[in-house]
Amino acid sequence: MTSVHLDPLVIEAVTRICKAEIPKYQNEQHYNTIPRQLFTSLCEAGLGGLNIPEELGGIGASATTNAAVFEVISQYDLGPAIFISVHAMVSGIIYRHGTMEQKLDVLPRLASGELLGAFALTEPQAGSDTSALATEATITGEGFSLRGNKCYITSAGFADLYLVFAKTSDAQGSGVSAFMVPKDTAGLSVGKPERKMGGELSPIASVFFDDAKIPASALLGPLHGGLKVALSGLAGGRVNIAACANGLSRAALDDAISYLKERHQFGKPLAEFQGLQFMLADMQMKLLASQLLTQNAADEIDRQSTAKGSSSSIKIASSAAKCFATDSAMEITTNAVQLFGGAGYIKDYSVERYMRDAKMLQIVEGANQVQRMIIAKELLA
């Protein structure tokens, strides 16, 4: 896939880093962690500053370049693609909604890899239903006091800066507000990493706030304006998840093609059996369609003057790409396991990992049922 907005030098650097570095960490020693050296290496290639302009230490990549980056990383391992995607989303949100003082203080450190960002929205009773948030931020004389807990937070326990969303209320009204909370804030604690089906190099955990005191300067955007802050990052995030799905699909298809050429049954390669050829053809068609939808959504963001995800066209394009590409990845990776036969169920081959990882992508950044609701709502508006 190519686009006028795509930076081939970035893609070349990412490919080189992924090929050299990621295999070092695909083992039990590093699972359920974010290896800091891996994060540093990715940031040295510019990935810490994807959504940060050059004047603040980043590379100011287009949405199209972002998508291409995450497709490449996911071909090697989904985990790093996920934690870098979240980091990039947090950086972009801070750039769009932060004060100049906040930007100058935080964004260069996010770009360099000194800081790893995390997005803390989901709660046990509130995921896509942001109106059900229970975490509260009480206004104090010096700032705010956070109380509540978040769950399934990517990079929790390894992140240096948490973008936290909490209910706020005062005499003027009530709503949700966004806060930048450093990891060493008193009253902030993190649970054990969850034992997940896949995504071993992208840990998730719960984050707890027990009267965590934060200064007034931690508020990101206007008081009670947190939902707009949160939603501003979702369109780009969904396009990136679609791209991650495409990377998984590409890796699964490539592995399946290689295996069918090598494996012999009944005196000839499996690749010569027409029934298996038809499966490959269907997998390739689904991947091509997914890549086109992803490219369309990225281009839609790049075409518009802002990437805040407010326009109907961006909402439809990003939700359609996320939904279709991740559903396709689930089908493609499952078929890759099938094409490997019994070997596909063995961990010595990567296709079983691709299938486990693909399942996650149908859920994160809004489950695919939610994406269908968004598309229908926009069509009927």
Image (spheres, helix red, strand yellow):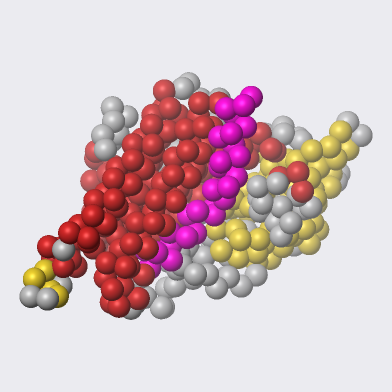
The residue under the point 27% across, 57% down is: 279
Q: Is residue 343 visible?
A: yes
The mark total stands at: 0
The residue under the point 37% across, 63% down is: 334
Q: Nearer the viewer, residue 379 or 41?
A: 379
The residue under the point 69% across, 42% down is: 178
Q: Quadrant of the C terminus?
A: top right
Image-based side of 287 in relation to 314, left or right: left
As drawn, 56 above or below 87: above
Q: Position of residue 288 (x, y in %)?
A: 29, 42
Q: Position of residue 346 (x, y in %)?
A: 33, 78
Magenta: main secondary structure equals helix
Image-quadrant location for residue 289: top left
Q: Position of residue 239 (x, y in %)?
A: 45, 41
Q: Which residues are magenta?
A: 353-381
Q: Is residue 232 visible?
A: no
The residue under the point 29% across, 45% down is: 285
Q: Is residue 364 magenta?
A: yes
Q: Position of residue 128 (x, y in %)?
A: 65, 47
Q: Most extreme residue toward the left, as rendered?
A: 267
As drawn, 103 above or below 359: above
Q: Is residue 239 magenta?
A: no
